[in-house]
Amino acid sequence: MAQANAARERRLTLLVSTRKGLWRAQGDATRRSWKLSGPQFLGHIIHHCVADPRDGKTWLVAARTGHLGPTIFRSSDRGRSWHEAKQPPAFREGSGRVVDHTFWLTPGHSSQPGTWYAGTSPQGLFRSDDAGATWRGIDGFNEHPQRKSWCGGDQDQTPDGAKLHSVLIDPRDANHLYIAMSSGGVFESNDAGAGWHPLNRGVRADFLPMPDPEFGHDPHCVRLHPAAPDRLYQQNHCGIYRLDRPSDRWEDLSAAMPKSVGAIGFPMVLHPGDPDTLWVFPMDGSSVWPRVSPGGKPAVYRSVNGGKSWQRQATGLPKLQAWFTVKRQAMTADALAPAGVYFGTTSGEVWGSRDEGRSWKCLAAHLPHIYAIEVA
């Protein structure tokens, strides 16, 4: 019985958020065999589903429903049952802004059980202190006198709507937060969101008339390393970047990527135990931005030296005529040894590697367009 329980504990669950609902892929202890279950919320757009690592049983879903509009669903039993938030994220009445959808969910600091953060489209930042039942806007950002300038106004400027994403919490300090906005850039708070300042020095904004603006950038995904929280990486509209605090200037890593592939993509994944190892999934960033795998030949690229060089990892992936790409939340890693890496595609496939990207296997296919994958 003890051995059976231990085996169950070693199993992984991937939470697969799609344009038409939520699925789960459960792997056995070896990560060789996977079972797909679902859907839940069939027909709803699920932008993000995240499991709370602090209690091991709470899951939150950011959903865009056909008749209810944007809302949050909560489960306290690992997805067996769900309850809609009593008060989902919403801008202040009279603000002139309306939440189109909640895009990003982040569990709060380990010292704050029940606290969650959410980023929305258009760009808004919200917090819950009751495990997602009720949400309030963080006025330090949402009501900041420069918010409209930071966000480039209140008009959507990206294909799927402007978004606030990559809500990051310093594991050493619950008051130290980072956020990213598409469009807007990266911002930092040292007082739990009461005040904010831009953190974009060194990042190109080739689409703006100013060569080095203070804000207005388009970060696609920003990650903070949990084992080395002074190390941040960024996949941006204009390349790949790294920041080592206390510096406030990002280092451009784009030149290390092969020129035939480029440094444009959406997701970025960090090795949970090694701050120098990370993965990206490039897409075609040519002038028309087709948002497909370069040349129809998908590949993951890994760096083991903090972005100074990259290695192509495509064993097991389609060799040609595969025109999918991977969205910013649709790539993740587990904390096992060796680390497993997983991504979901715009063509509805889930791919996994149990050897840190050296080889890949299709774990599920024929799903709807995948928006996010997280490990539970």
Image (cartoon, grey):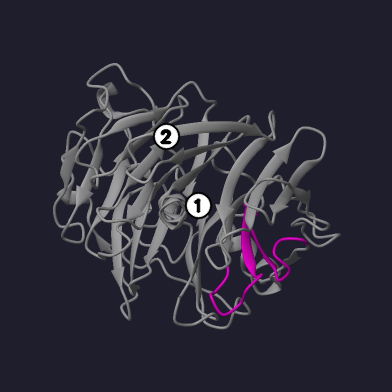
Decide whether residue 123 is among the magenta residues: yes
Q: Residue at x 45, y 45 (%)?
A: 328
Q: Position of residue 109 (x, y in %)?
A: 54, 74
Residue highlighted by disc 2: 34
Q: Which residue type carries mark 1?
A: Ala
Few, some or many C-alpha atoms within 10 Å of disc 2 (few <14, some 14-19, many ≥20)? many
- The tag earlier along the polypeptide, 2 or 1, is 2
Q: Residue at x 45, y 55 (%)?
A: 9
Q: Residue furthest top?
A: 321
Residue highlighted by disc 1: 376
Tell me if 134 is positioned left or right of 114 in this view. right
Of residues 34 and 161, the one nearer the viewer is 34
Q: Position of residue 270 (x, y in %)?
A: 32, 57
Magenta residues?
Answer: 108-133
The answer to whether residue 216 is visible is yes
Tell me if 18 is positioned left or right of 95 in this view. left
Q: Residue furthest front?
A: 1
Q: Which residue type carries mark 2?
A: Trp
